[in-house]
Image (cartoon, rainbow, N blue to C red):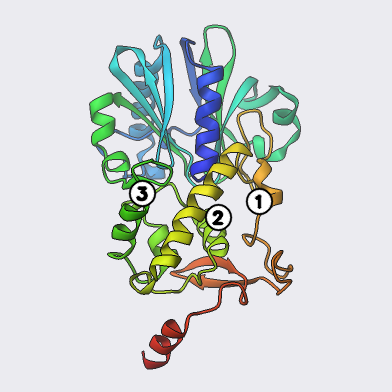
Amino acid sequence: MPELPEVQTVVNDLNKKVAGKRIKDVWTDNPKLVRDHLHPSRRISDADIKEAQKNFRHFKRDLVGEKILRAERKGKNVLVYLSSNKLLLIHQKMTGHLLFGKWEIKKGRPKGLEPEAIKNDPFNGFIHLIITFSDKTQLALSDMRKFAKAMVASVGQIHATKDIASLGIDALSPDLTLKKFEELIKTSGPTIKQALLKPELISGIGNIYADESLHRAKIHPQQNPKKLTKDELKRLHGAIKSILRKAVRLRGTSTSDFRDTEGKEGGYTKWRLVYGRQGESCQSCQTTIKRIKVGGRGTHLCPKCQKESRLYKSRKRNS
């Protein structure tokens, strides 16, 4: 799933490439991806295709003629501000990514025309939504697993949805000071890895950057966050900020399907410390990186650099 650096990369690109453009048309082959803003968490079943088509007609009607003002990121959501006080929300979910280029529809399927990466990379070929601008450029959503969602409503209505209203403080917000971070982490649980993945606590961190940050801070992902020392919390706070900023500069991570708006892979992929590197050697100590499950999520760590603390081992033995 695109996390903070990937979504921020998309938002930065949108502000450069589509701000000021006017929407001329909207196409989809999967109207179920469009959600009613009053019920954004409800997925429409295959049996409700008429409702899905109705939602898409309203979605298209609300977008055509609108001018793109700017884009911003909220957690892992892309928010596109439109004229007439409207707001387009796109959550790319597990395998979605936005692309800027040109397509043509042949036999009901989009064919990429430009740029080259859109034409040649198979991960850019799962196009299910295309927004066409008056200058004939296009913004498209490629989503292999069809979990992404989009909705449009007034600014106030979108900000009132659970997608936005339930989000905690942003991981790169200057308001996430060390003191605030300590307060949040000390009230969470049951493991530090699970705490970092709670968007209502701190938003924007996902599986990739939780693993990377915990390794940089030399903290075992199964540690009880309430038992972390001040020094550990300071290291983790700094690691999160540092790694997320670096990943934004390098335009995200592409261990599987993420691509930027030009269809290119993210540059942080080759800088990964542990994520997706199970079986390889740790860059710090040459110990073999392991993959375990924490809270049902695949988790990567170096057993030597991220030793379980004596306190954690004692708690584990006594449980």
Which of the pair 162/279 is nearer the observer?
Answer: 279
Q: Position of residue 119 (x, y in %)?
A: 73, 29
Q: Is residue 1 visible?
A: no
Q: Quadrant of residue 175?
A: top left
Lower sequence index among marks 1 and 3: 3
Lower sequence index among marks 3 and 2: 3
**Residue extending furthest top?**
135
Q: Position of residue 193 (x, y in %)?
A: 45, 65
Q: Which residue is mark 3?
A: 177
Q: Which residue is mark 1?
A: 255
What amino acid is at disc 2?
A: Ile
Determine the secondary structure under disc 3. Answer: loop
Q: Is residue 18 visible?
A: yes
Between marks 1 and 3 in the image, the one whose residue lies nearer the viewer: 3
How far, Cα to Cα, is label 2 from label 1?
Answer: 9 Å
Between marks 3 and 2 in the image, the one whose residue lies nearer the viewer: 3
Indicate left or right for 282 with 99 as reference: right
Number of marks in picture: 3
How far, Cα to Cα, is label 3 from label 2?
Answer: 22 Å
What amino acid is at disc 1?
A: Thr
- Which residue is depicted at the point 48% across and 61% down? 235
Indicate left or right for 161 with 259 as reference: left
- Which residue is depicted at the point 73% across and 37% down? 121
Q: Which residue is mark 2?
A: 208
How far, Cα to Cα, is label 1 from label 3?
Answer: 30 Å
Which of the pair 103/287 is nearer the observer?
Answer: 287
**Residue extending furthest front?**
231
310, above or below 54, in the image: below
Checking the image for residue 3, the label placed there is none
